Image: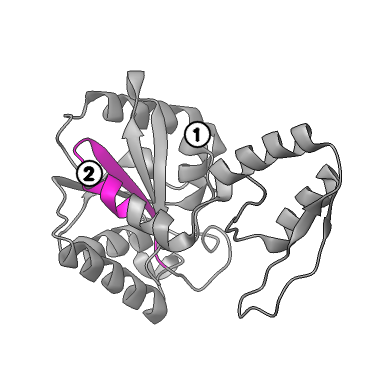
């Protein structure tokens, strides 16, 4: 083997990685996509081992990764955690917000509602349905879940926002793991929640409207098997 072809969403970071390994940019023909042809100038064993690891992490194109994630979601026992769709921006909610008053909260924009509808259409096109639809009580999450599935979601306190409520983090994460541990192996569940909660559970910071596909391991320990975002 004398060359590798890698796809990456972070070209500059990948170039830096190669440089650390001792690879220098070489001549590259004029292609219609950005890229670089680094050449191996030493430390071959070290670099090839690191390149193999990089291939496992970033070797798939975004299109292939999305296809794999859709395939995983169709499998029994997989669930999806979705961050609410696009909002007006900012962090948390306005001072004095109330859960019983949507107007006092940060809500979806028209673009966010359209995004959620497109994702719902993608579910329908693939024949994906959910046995349960659970949501944070925050209005932006409830609305996202309904637009995704056409169903009124069930509020679930364990999916609540953690912004300004850090003292609830451990309890909510433990509750979600307990739920995952007890769910049936054939059930498919959609959880509509907040980015900060998804990060607390699986260590990923999803974009608004992004989905994280999860399969529960021993004791409900969540294992991320894919990510999806319908543009």
Q: Where is residue 200 in the image (x, y as percent from the top left)?
A: 51, 38
Q: Position of residue 42 (x, y in %)?
A: 86, 41
Q: Which residue is drawn at 16% across and 49% down?
A: 130
Badge 2, how many Cα within 10 Å: few under 14, some, many 20+?
many
Q: Residue at x 43, y 67 (%)?
A: 104
Q: In the image, which is nearer the foreground, mark 2 or mark 1? A: 2
Left or right relative to 212: residue 153 = left
Badge 1, how many Cα within 10 Å: few under 14, some, many 20+?
some
Determine whether the residue tagged by mark 1 lies in a helix, strand or loop. Answer: helix
In what quadrant of the picture does the N terminus appear?
A: top right
Q: Is residue 66 visible?
A: yes
Q: Position of residue 87 (x, y in %)?
A: 46, 70
**Residue bearing the label numbered 2:** 189
Q: How many numbered discs? A: 2
The circle drawn on residue 169 is: 1
Left or right relative to 217: residue 168 = right
Q: Quadrant of residue 103?
A: bottom left
Q: What segment carries the magenta color? A: 69-85
Q: Does the magenta stretch include residue 224?
A: no
Left or right relative to 192: residue 86 = right
Q: Is residue 208 visible?
A: no
Determine whether the residue tagged by mark 2 lies in a helix, strand or loop. Answer: strand
Q: Where is residue 5 in the image (x, y as percent from the top left)?
A: 60, 56
Q: Which residue is drawn at 46% across and 36% down?
A: 201
């Amino acid at each position: 083997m004398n060359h590798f072809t890698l796809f990456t969403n972070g070209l500059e970071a990948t170039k830096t990685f190669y440089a650390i390994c001792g690879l220098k940019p070489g001549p590259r023909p004029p292609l219609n996509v950005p890229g670089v042809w680094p050449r191996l100038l030493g430390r071959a064993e070290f670099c090839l081992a690191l390149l193999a690891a990089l291939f496992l992490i970033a070797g798939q194109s975004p299109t292939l990764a999305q296809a794999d994630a859709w395939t995983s979601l169709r499998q029994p026992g997989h669930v999806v955690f979705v961050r609410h769709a696009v909002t007006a921006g900012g962090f948390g909610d306005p001072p004095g917000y109330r859960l019983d008053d949507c107007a006092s909260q940060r809500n979806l924009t028209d673009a966010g509602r359209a995004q959620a509808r497109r994702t719902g259409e993608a579910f329908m096109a693939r024949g994906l349905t959910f046995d349960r639809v659970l949501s944070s009580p925050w209005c932006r999450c409830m609305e996202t879940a309904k637009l995704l599935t056409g169903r009124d979601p069930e509020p679930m306190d364990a999916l609540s926002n953690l912004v300004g409520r850090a003292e609830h983090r451990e309890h909510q994460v433990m509750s979600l793991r307990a739920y995952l541990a007890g769910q049936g192996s054939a059930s498919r569940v959609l959880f509509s929640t907040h980015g900060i909660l998804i990060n607390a559970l699986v260590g990923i910071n999803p974009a608004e409207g992004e989905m994280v596909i999860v399969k529960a391991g021993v004791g409900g320990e969540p294992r991320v098997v894919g990510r999806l975002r319908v543009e």
